[in-house]
Amino acid sequence: MSGRAARSVRVALPGKDRSYPVRLGTGTLARAGDEIARTTKATRAVVVTVPPVARRYAPRLERSLREAGIRSHRIVVPDGDASKNLRQISKLYDALLELGADRTTAIIALGGGVVGDLAGFLAASYLRGVPFVQVPTTILAMVDSSVGGKVGVNVPQGKNLIGAFHQPRLVWVDLEVLASLPARQRAAGLVEAIKHGVILDRALFERFERDLERALALDPAVLVSLLTRAVALKAEVVGRDEREAGVRTLLNFGHTLGHAAEKLSGYGKLLHGEAVAAGMVHAARRSEALELAPGGTAERLQAVVERLGIEPELPPFPRRAYLSAIRVDKKRTESHIRFVVLRRIGAADTVPLTPSEVYPPRPGPSQRRQRRGSLRT
Ligand SMILES: NC(=O)c1ccc[n+]([C@@H]2O[C@H](COP(=O)([O-])OP(=O)(O)OC[C@H]3O[C@@H](n4cnc5c(N)ncnc54)[C@H](O)[C@@H]3O)[C@@H](O)[C@H]2O)c1
Ligand SMILES: [Zn+2]
């Protein structure tokens, strides 16, 4: 299947020309140019990337742009989440102005979620918006951050607090680039794909249960099929609720505690997907304890997380540390959090809970009693 764009998913949005395709294939990077030219009508492009990705993949993309008649420039930013900030954005504005970039210049993010969020915010704000293309190179970016138009940067007060909605014109996914992605990053990225199954599609979750090791080993047939389904679910949610007024909230499953664990551990220790995995197991246990999900739901999820080689328990910080981290998370309304719970594998819901209900005292023992069927306290 090398060289062919095997699958395509459409993100259907209201408004003229706002819908866009996500194209997934293996070995397709070298021919992204034609589709980029067609969807952006750009004559110039700026490729924003990071060193580990630039070295391996930028030349292939740039050759393809050239063949499609697009003049391209490369901007390499330092690797890591620390680059997702306003200082970096300011430097990027300077670079674009120096190049004389205008509204016929497309900005192309070649990299993981960091590059996508940063380059996307640049594209959203430079000249009040220029065409944007995502070429995601991590699993997390392929199934999650490149689809849906959320872009932004971190500030010292918190992560992703400054941003915009700026949808790409195209998302071009070449699964072959995952061969160089470190194994730990692969596992963490799969967490978000599994999340889409857990909250929306039992059949997808069951395919992960069956084929997890083959997915981790990047078996092309398994991977293209699992990731395409995961992307289709995200696309459908975004199409129904672009601005997160309703169903898109469900995608935050596992993130209330996940964000708290990431923050308490010090950003960079736990990968985002690792923190979310433990957050999902916690949320599934809470769903059972609140008698919203049948017994055994959390155990199934935990088993998959363990097979990914990820620790399913939240790191052991004091309860009060979790509570204060939850309280400052931006996804809350007043004293209650719209906490995402499972109804069962494949169906999720939100319930208003106080931080104390989200993270009750001594969660371990009381939940074990719950599973044996004793009364709720
Ligand atoms: N916008 C959204 O909707 C959304 C959703 C989820 C996460 N995010 C954001 O995404 C970011 C995390 O993204 P990420 O997990 O992709 O991290 P990342 O972009 O930092 O990439 C992880 C690491 O892998 C390297 N890398 C990337 N592709 C590679 C490849 N093919 N081969 C070898 N190395 C490669 C990167 O250089 C980096 O060191 C966070 O900033 C998070 O806030 C955004
Ligand atoms: Zn996430």
Image (spheres, rainbow, N blue to C red):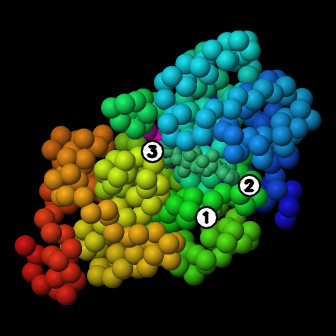
Ligand 1 closer than 8 Å to label 2 CB: yes
Determine if the magenta segment contains residue 242: yes
SS of the residue under disc 3: loop
Determine if the magenta segment contains residue 213: no
**Residue 21 in sight in this render:** no
SS of the residue under disc 1: helix
Q: Residues within 10 Å of mark 2 (few under 14, many from 20)?
A: many
Query: CA–CA distance between discs 2 and 1?
Result: 13 Å
User: Relative to the observer, which residue lies in front, 222 or 77?
Assistant: 77
Q: Quadrant of residue 122?
A: top right
User: Amino acid under label 2?
Assistant: Val
At horizontal 53% and vertical 34% (from top left) the residue drawn is 83
Q: Residue furthest left?
A: 377
Percent of width and height locating residue 108: 70, 34
Disc number placed over residue 183 in the picture, else none:
1
- 114, above or below 226, in the image: above
Could you tell whether 331 is left or right of 234 in the image? left
User: Amino acid under label 1?
Assistant: Ala
Percent of width and height locating residue 91: 59, 19
For the magenta stretch, what is the residue range? Answer: 238-243
Could you tell whether 160 is left or right of 101 in the image? left
Of the residues tagged 3 and 1, which is closer to the observer?
1
At horizontal 84% and vertical 65% (from top left) the residue drawn is 1
Percent of width and height locating residue 369: 16, 82
Query: CA–CA distance between discs 2 and 3?
Result: 31 Å
Q: Which of marks 2 and 3 is nearer the N terminus?
A: 2
SS of the residue under disc 2: helix
User: Relative to the observer, which residue lies in front, 65 or 350?
Assistant: 65
Q: Which residue lies furthest to the bottom in this view?
A: 372
Label 3 sits on residue? 241
Label 2 sits on residue? 177
